[in-house]
Image (spheres, grey):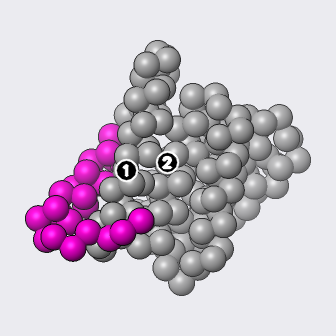
Amino acid sequence: MKKEKNTLVNQIHRYFGCEFNNSLWDYFDKKDRTDEENDDMIGIAFSALTHWKIYSGGTAANVQRGEYMIAKAFYKAGNRKESMIHAEKCLKISEEFKSEMKDFDFAFANEIMALAHDLNGNKSGFEKFKEIARKKGEEIQEEGDRRVYFVEFKKSFGES
């Protein structure tokens, strides 16, 4: 995708990338979403990724995080195949662009892989990636980032 050159339009892409990305957490936390809300959630996840890809300051980490959000949206909507496809893309980007990722990116990539495996009925894949996600979470250096990660981890896996 071609990066934006116009300064104003570029900042608009950054703005919408952030806004769409951040708005997804409300959808993820909602217990009883309608089919329309699931469609909106998935559309917003794709929109966030598109804006990050066009924004000139967008990085591989932004794309990885966008794939995470898409995978999570499909997971939350119960779409097995699509959740796995985007979880695998998220993990692949994490591995290919290691130097551009933050430590929490690896934890989240493995968390969504575990969830996608669970949704697809693969117990061994679920257990494997959940354990990796826990270990990667424990390796997060910044205390605030680690705390945020484990709040999401616990919600994802129903742990108190």
**Does residue 82 appear in this view?**
yes
- State the residue in front, 78 or 7: 7
Q: Residues within 10 Å of mark 2 (few under 14, many from 20)?
A: many
Looking at the image, the residue that sits furthest to the bottom is: 99
Q: Which residue is mark 2?
A: 69
Callout 1, which amino acid?
Ala
Predominant secondary structure, magenta span = helix
- State the residue in front, 27 or 43: 43
In the displayed structure, 10 sits above or below 152; it is: below
**Does residue 143 appear in this view?**
no
In percent of the image, x 54 and y 84: which residue is there? 99
Marker disc for residue 48:
1
Callout 2, which amino acid?
Met
Q: Secondary structure at mark 1?
A: helix
Q: Tell me where residue 62 appears, x and y as whole percent.
A: 42, 65
Looking at the image, the residue that sits furthest to the left is: 8
Total marks shown come to: 2
Q: Tell me where residue 132 appears, x and y as whole percent.
A: 73, 61
Tell me whether the residue at label 1 lies in contact with that at label 2, contact meaning CB atoms closer than 8 angstroms: yes
What range of the chain is rendered magenta?
1-25
In percent of the image, x 42 and y 54: which residue is there? 49
In percent of the image, x 75 and y 55: which residue is there? 129
